[in-house]
Amino acid sequence: MTDQPSSIGFIGIGLLGRGLALALSARGYPVTGAASRSFSSAQWLSERVDGCRAYGTPQALADNSDLVFVTTPDSVIAEVASRVMWRSGQGVVHCSGASSTELLRPAELQGAAVGSMHPFQTFAGLTRSEDAEARLNGIAFAVAGELWLPAYLDRMVRALGGHPVNIPDRDRPLYHASAILGCGYLAALLQAAVDCWTAIGYTEEEALAALVPLAGTTIENIRRNGVAPSVTGPAVRGDLSTMNTHMAALGDSVPSGALAYGALTTASLPLAERRGVSPEAVAGMRTLADKYLRRWDSCPE
Ligand SMILES: NC(=O)c1ccc[n+]([C@@H]2O[C@H](COP(=O)([O-])OP(=O)(O)OC[C@H]3O[C@@H](n4cnc5c(N)ncnc54)[C@H](OP(=O)(O)O)[C@@H]3O)[C@@H](O)[C@H]2O)c1
């Protein structure tokens, strides 16, 4: 049993495995091993982290690590947990946002302490320690676990500059949906906005040159003032006529944007109410959005 691991290994050296291992090593944690589906991925990490060895199999890595982060895709975590022979007192942690530690049950049954540590952050494009450290600084991490792990992971999160949050298992789907709405679907929404420009005849690069400053300022306004005061546009003006022209134009040219526009009009209504838009105008926008979404629902593919 150890509550001060002197060897930390990673199984699954992808976007998150790379970023988290680089940041932990930079903060003085002993990242000593890497294993992945392909040996070249494990080597990628061992070449960048002093004292880190690439192992040919997850089992060899687990045999040589006090604490193992299973940073494979969610769909593979349970398989890795059941294939490896764990030892009593060893720590085994996954970084999935959607799943509980139930995925690690096979390790727990063998006496390992199991936990999860989910960084509420996106890991695309990290190859340098400095960038990994900066990306993790100031973010929330959902931490869960048993035995010595919760206290240890809490300290680890604080050492990375983050703050731990406690999400009950029943609320994990909601917690993870929030991450997808704020990240992956935000990107999908901006793709629809880009598609409007390309439908007019601009390139994607030109579209992004126009959209990124707008989106960036909106995020900055939200950071400073909160969501409701940062909303601009027809929803918070109760401007049905402009919405009507948008919906018609999107329906003609950018179907993916049309559906998003209708759904987000509905989602904006509570914000419109908070901004003082009249109940009549809010009801009018709801009717317009419902009518519009029904039309799209009934359209053949
Ligand atoms: N990406 C994010 O922004 C992010 C954010 C928060 C949490 N997470 C969580 O982090 C975990 C990893 O996600 P990710 O985005 O980093 O995935 P990813 O980029 O696809 O990387 C996963 C890695 O796992 C390896 N792998 C796949 N099957 C394996 C197996 N059977 N045995 C050993 N290694 C295997 C792959 O290895 P090879 O390269 O060797 O083929 C791949 O590099 C997930 O639980 C995810 O929910 C991700």
Image (cartoon, rainbow, N blue to C red):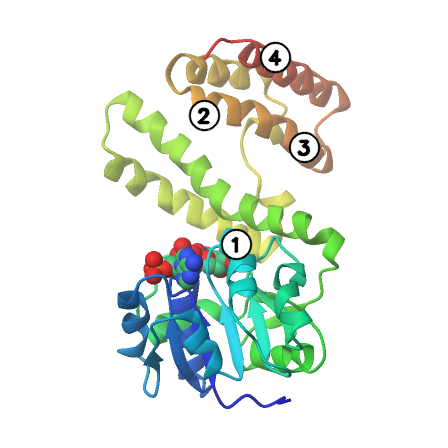
Name the kind of residue labelled 2 in the image. Answer: Gly
Residue 156 place in picture, x, y as percent: 57, 80
Residue 193 place in picture, x, y as percent: 40, 32
Name the kind of residue labelled 1 in the image. Answer: Asp
Residue at image location 71% in from the left, 65% down from the top: 166
Q: Callout 2: helix, strand or loop? A: helix
Q: Earlier in the sequence, mark 3 or mark 2?
A: 2
Comparing labels 3 and 2, the label whose residue is closer to the camera: 2
- Label 3: which residue? 272
Asked if disc 3 is less than 8 Å from ligand 1, the answer is no
State how far apart marks 3 and 1 are (Cα): 38 Å
Examine the image and state in which quarter residue 22 appears: bottom left
Q: Earlier in the sequence, mark 1 or mark 2?
A: 1
Residue 237 visible here? no
Name the kind of residue labelled 3 in the image. Answer: Ala
State how far apart marks 1 and 2 are (Cα): 30 Å
Q: Callout 3: helix, strand or loop? A: helix
Name the kind of residue labelled 4 in the image. Answer: Arg
Left or right of residue 54, residue 226 in this image: right
Q: Residues within 10 Å of mark 1 (few under 14, many from 20)?
A: some
- Label 1: which residue? 74
**Quadrant of ligand 1 in image:** bottom left
Asked if disc 1 is less than 8 Å from ligand 1, the answer is yes
Q: Earlier in the sequence, mark 4 or mark 3?
A: 3
Rendered position, 129 above or below 120: below
Residue 113 place in picture, x, y as percent: 65, 76
Task: Between residue 265 and residue 230, name the one nearer to us.
Answer: 265
- Label 4: which residue? 294
- Label 2: which residue? 257
